[in-house]
Amino acid sequence: MTEVRKKEAGPEEKRRLALKVIARLKKEYPDADCTLDYNEAWKLLVSVRLAAQCTDARVNVVVEELYKKFPNVDALAAADVGEIEKIVRPCGLGNSKARDISACMKLLRDQYGGKVPEDFDALLKLPGVGRKSANLIMGDVFGKPAIVTDTHCIRLCNRIGLVEGIKEPKKVEMELWKIIPPKEGSDFCHRLVYHGREVCTARTKPHCDRCCLEDICEKNGVE
């Protein structure tokens, strides 16, 4: 029998759904935060570039050696790209990631006094930094409103019904800005990562039987 999805919810209905989802995930994952290890803004900038097509767990291991050899922005900016690549190669795409990291650190050194700029548009101009990375920096480092549309966010928001059939990260972000309270955006996205890894998984059948959103998820709203 062909499944017929419910009529797409309107903006107000989606806002109400979003608030329910936020509340339940907050209760389920009260301490959820960024799973990349860092203690300085520039280190998060490096780690988020390395995390592309790589697990955060592996990145956290690799950067230990990277920061031991190049402990600050100036050292990493002055490093030979080949030396950076040797260390970051386990994260995949070693050559392009090493080039981006080198160019980014040089720009921080030469234009921003070694500091990460507290401006979204300025962040987007840094080599290797896209909207996802810029939002992560804005939310986690500077405490500004942010929505990080990684693969977990995109998958779960489509399943839950917060967006409908939208897979392009920027479009998902723009839709979520309409329904997610700005102060909740950053933590909400971190909680989606936890939920996406533990319950609403990508590579196996979602564990709906132990999902805190089971009764309000659009995935279950079929006739």
Image (spheres, helix red, strand yellow):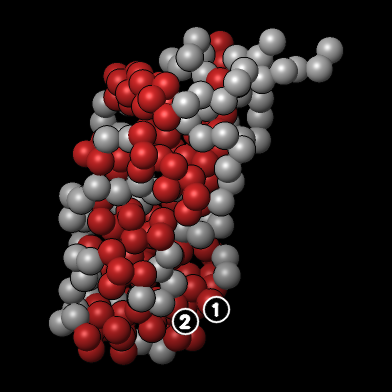
Q: Where is residue 104 drawn, in percent x and y?
A: 35, 79
Quadrant in the rendering for residue 67: bottom left
Q: Where is residue 152 drawn, in percent x and y?
A: 50, 40
- Left of 58 or right of it: where is 168? right
One can see residue 115 in this view? yes
One can see residue 71 in this view? no
Q: Which mark is residue 99?
A: 2
Q: Where is residue 216 drawn, in percent x and y?
A: 48, 14
Residue drawn at x 42%, y 29% as measured from the top left: 11
Residue drawn at x 65%, y 35% as measured from the top left: 203
For the N terminus, the quadrant is top right
Considering the numbered disc 2 on the image, is that residue within a helix, a strand or a loop? Answer: helix
Disc tally is 2
Residue drawn at x 22%, y 85% as measured from the top left: 111
Q: Where is residue 165 drawn, in percent x and y?
A: 61, 38
| Tag 1–tag 2 contact (CB < 8 Å) | yes
Direction left: furthest residue: 113
Q: Estimate the spatial distance between the alpha carbons at disc 1 and disc 2, rounded to whole Å.
A: 6 Å
Q: Please name the amino acid that badge 2 sits on.
A: Arg
Residue identifier under label 1: 95
- State whether residue 200 is above or below residue 3: below
Residue drawn at x 53%, y 56% as measured from the top left: 54
Identify which residue, 117 or 54, lies in the foreground.
117
Q: Please name the amino acid that badge 1 sits on.
A: Asn
- Left of 132 or right of it: where is 71? left
Q: Residues within 10 Å of mark 2 (few under 14, many from 20)?
A: some
